[in-house]
Amino acid sequence: MTPRLIVSDLDGTLLGRDHRLHADTIDVLRTLVKLGHHLVLASGRHYADMRVFRDQLDVPAHLISSNGAYTHVPDDLLLDANHIAPQQAAALIKLLRPDSVRLSLYMDNAWYIDAEAPSYLEMHAATGFAYQVVPPEQMPTQGIGKILYGGAPDELAKIEALIREFSDDSLHVTYSTSDSLEIMAGGVNKGTALSALLKRIAIAPENCLAFGDNLNDVEMLSLVGEAHFMINSHPEMAGRLSAAKQIGHHGEAAVAQLLRERFGLVSAATES
């Protein structure tokens, strides 16, 4: 048996509608790791946020967080960190935006936001990961893995256009959802982080299965031998990933279903 590496996004992919792991997903991933396969979780979420899901799975798993800005090994050692240049971070923090658009910074060990945003906490209720409110004029410009703007898609499109104009491709700009515009250092994305990790652990990209649902997953899905995107994915995913396979809905644990079929696993219900 050739060991495979399974890499998955979280929200909209591996997690259900409640942003939690389905029992069947936990069962499948634990089984595959016991059989000798490898697991990587790759998300726009902060490392401290992702770690809770890895601990629930209770299996060794590398974590690629903040859209590739950080990579941690299963025992929590930081393997790689890529920060936005301080001058660029300062420009992004000062960028004019509507009052309704929230500015967040993902630091090495914290999440800063410019004003209270109770709706943001709903997404992180399962992990308890919470922001600290810091006025923009007091925000640091060093040690930032990701900057994100949250708001209406039309407002974010205007901000995106401004960023692309002044950054001249020196920043990586993407979306994790239609209302979350996310910026990392140039060349930083889930795909480049996964490529570097594969070299370290000596697994070929063709021996990887990957799952995602949004634009911040495109580079990762383009890298691997078996790419899958959810039926609930961003509408542009099919056009950008001609070799990828569309699977079911994240709310119905479609990743677990696909993995059971792919590896010939018996379901827990069948065993009982």
Image: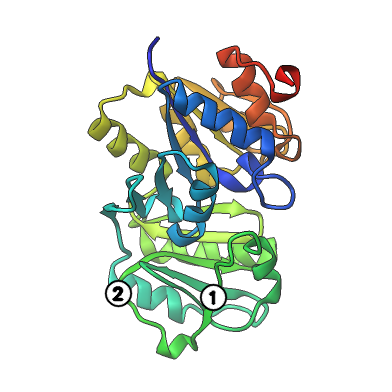
Q: Amino acid at mark 1?
A: Tyr
| Helix, strand or loop at mark 1 | loop
* Quadrant of the drawing holding the C terminus: top right
Residue 204 to residue 111: above or below: above
Residue 219 to residue 131: above or below: above
Q: Nearer the viewer, mark 1 or mark 2?
A: 1
At a point 47% along the width and 60% down the height, the residue shown is 46
Q: Nearer the viewer, residue 180 or 134?
A: 134
- The residue most toward the front is 272
Alpha carbons under labels 1 and 2: distance apart: 18 Å
The image quadrant that residue 4 belongs to is top left
In the rendered structure, find residue 131 and report the number of the disc placed on it. 1
Residue 146 in the image: x percent, y percent? 42, 63
In the rendered structure, find residue 209 and report the number of the disc placed on it. none
Q: Amino acid at mark 2?
A: Gln
Residue 126 in the image: x percent, y percent? 64, 59
Q: Circle 2 is placed at which residue position? A: 142
Residue 18 in the image: x percent, y percent? 73, 52
